[in-house]
Amino acid sequence: MTGFFETHRNASRTEQRSQRRLVRIFAALPVAALLALSACSSSPSPETTGSIVTHEDAVRGVAYWGKRYRDNTRDRDAALNFASALRRTGQSTQAVAVLQSASIVHTNDPVVQAAYGKALAAEGQFENALTVIRAAQRPDLPDWKLISAEGAILDQTGIHEEARARYAYALQLAPQEPTVMSNLGMSHVLTGDLPEAEKLLRQAITFPGADERVRQNLSLVVGLQGRFEEAEQIAKADLPPEQAAANIAYLRALLTQENTWDKLKQEGKAS
């Protein structure tokens, strides 16, 4: 993979500082790691970056989907949801194992392959992740889900321009696909360009099929800019009022620590 780590090393110091700080914020939030979910609420797809999910929901998901998976390890939806819940509760090694088994059973399923690739990336196995994603891709019939997943993995390694090129290609294949536009927006968050991220996410929520994950990403980005009341109102479109308030209060507390919000604004101007 020529130039893979060289590109990461050549990222600007400002971008690296901004990305590290944002990644710390994302790690502290109850956030779904950088890859997506499908349009069906019962079956996660690995294309969307960042939506807020509570730890309690994830724990319940582990119990429910774990039983479904044990009852039938060939159940695609059970495997995807079980692995997603495992990752959200910090059990990423088991999530990789579940998705590795699913990828063998569902060899030609791009959603499963993308989820497996993302799980590998979450474990820091970036080259293996990209190998899985690219091997599943058919040049004659390119799949936008795999292309978007590849972009998300590249974003995790700091190769943002190449990641955005993958999202642009995915949008050529699936115009107005909200999960891809959401990933593109979150890519700009990782380089500290919050206004551009917000603009893209506001576009994404107008696309057909935009769901709560995309709206919660917009809420997160608005909150990262210090507009907490507006962020809470956006979050309330999908969450109970008390949960929306708790999420934004938690975000506010994180940004207050060491003036993180001011640093993000300054780094966004400098990038």
Image (cartoon, helix red, strand yellow):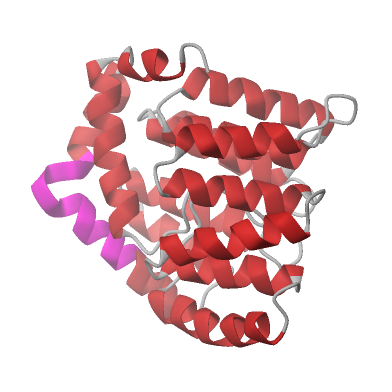
Name the quadrant of the C terminus. Answer: top left
Asked if 98 appears above or below 107 in the picture, the reply is: below
Q: Residue furthest right?
A: 140
Q: In the image, what residue occupies the spot 39% across and 42% down?
A: 124
Rendering quarter of residue 171: top right
Query: Which region of the structure is painted magenta?
Result: 248-261
Rendering quarter of residue 104: bottom right
Whether residue 63 appears in this view of the structure is yes
Q: Is residue 217 left or right of residue 36?
A: left
How many marks do you count on the picture? 0
Q: In the image, what residue occupies the spot 62% across and 70% down?
A: 81
Rendering quarter of residue 195: top left
Helix, strand or loop for the magenta stretch, by majority = helix
Task: State the image coordinates of residue 152 (x, y, percent, origin top left).
Answer: 55, 37
Q: Is residue 116 left or right of residue 85?
A: right
Q: In the image, what residue occupies the spot 65% across and 29% down?
A: 167
Q: Is residue 196 left or right of residue 48?
A: left
Task: State the image coordinates of residue 107 (x, y, percent, origin top left).
Answer: 78, 51
Task: State the image coordinates of residue 105 (x, y, percent, origin top left).
Answer: 76, 60
Q: In the image, what residue occupies the spot 72% across and 70% down?
A: 77
Q: Residue furthest left?
A: 258
Task: State the image coordinates of residue 9 (x, y, percent, origin top left).
Answer: 31, 16
Q: Nearer the viewer, residue 102 or 202?
A: 102
Q: Nearer the viewer, residue 152 or 172?
A: 152
Whether residue 200 appears in this view of the structure is no
Q: Nearer the viewer, residue 210 or 116?
A: 116
Q: Is residue 147 left or right of residue 232?
A: right
Q: Is residue 240 magenta?
A: no
